[in-house]
Amino acid sequence: MSQSEPSFFERERDRLSLDITACFEDLLSSSNVLNRKLEEVMGMTREYETIASLWKSFHELMRGQRDEVLEDRTTVPGTGAHVVSTNSKR
């Protein structure tokens, strides 16, 4: 064996080093893609939070109106808010 020719160990070491380097590059690329996707999801979440708060406000407004109607059961709807008498004297 001459000194200029690499040994089996050196060839395997170089091959494995190249393989590890390629795998790390793939890992870095995949983690960058994952990071971009997570940023997209977080952006969409912020958009949905705005819509959700709008619907929550609407729901609370409607629930408040419903509670007012439930509290005011002494009137008959559609009669101009006339009070219905519960005493029947016949």
Image (cartoon, rainbow, N blue to C red):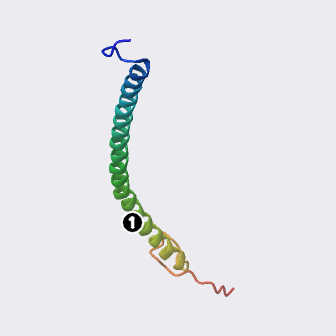
Question: Looking at the image, which is closer to me, 34 or 54?
Answer: 34
If the image is split into quadrants, where does the C terminus sit?
Answer: bottom right
If the image is split into quadrants, where does the N terminus sit?
Answer: top left
Left/right of residue 9 with respect to residue 4 in the rendered view = right
- The spot of residue 38 in percent (x, y) is 37, 46
Residue highlighted by disc 1: 57
Classify 29 as above or below 8: below
Classify 28 as above or below 22: below
Crowdedness near tag 1: few (<14), some (14–19) or many (≥20) residues, C-alpha within 10 Å:
few
User: Residue at the location (40% across, 30% down)?
Assistant: 20
Q: Residue furthest front?
A: 2
Find residue 4 and report its image quarter: top left
Classify 45 as above or below 71: above
Classify 65 as above or below 34: below
Under mark 1, the amino acid is: Ser
Q: Secondary structure at mark 1?
A: helix
Question: Looking at the image, which is closer to me, 66 or 36?
Answer: 36
Q: Residue furthest top?
A: 1
Question: Looking at the image, which is closer to me, 24 or 4?
Answer: 4
Left/right of residue 74 with respect to residue 42 in the rendered view = right
- The spot of residue 58 in percent (x, y) is 40, 63
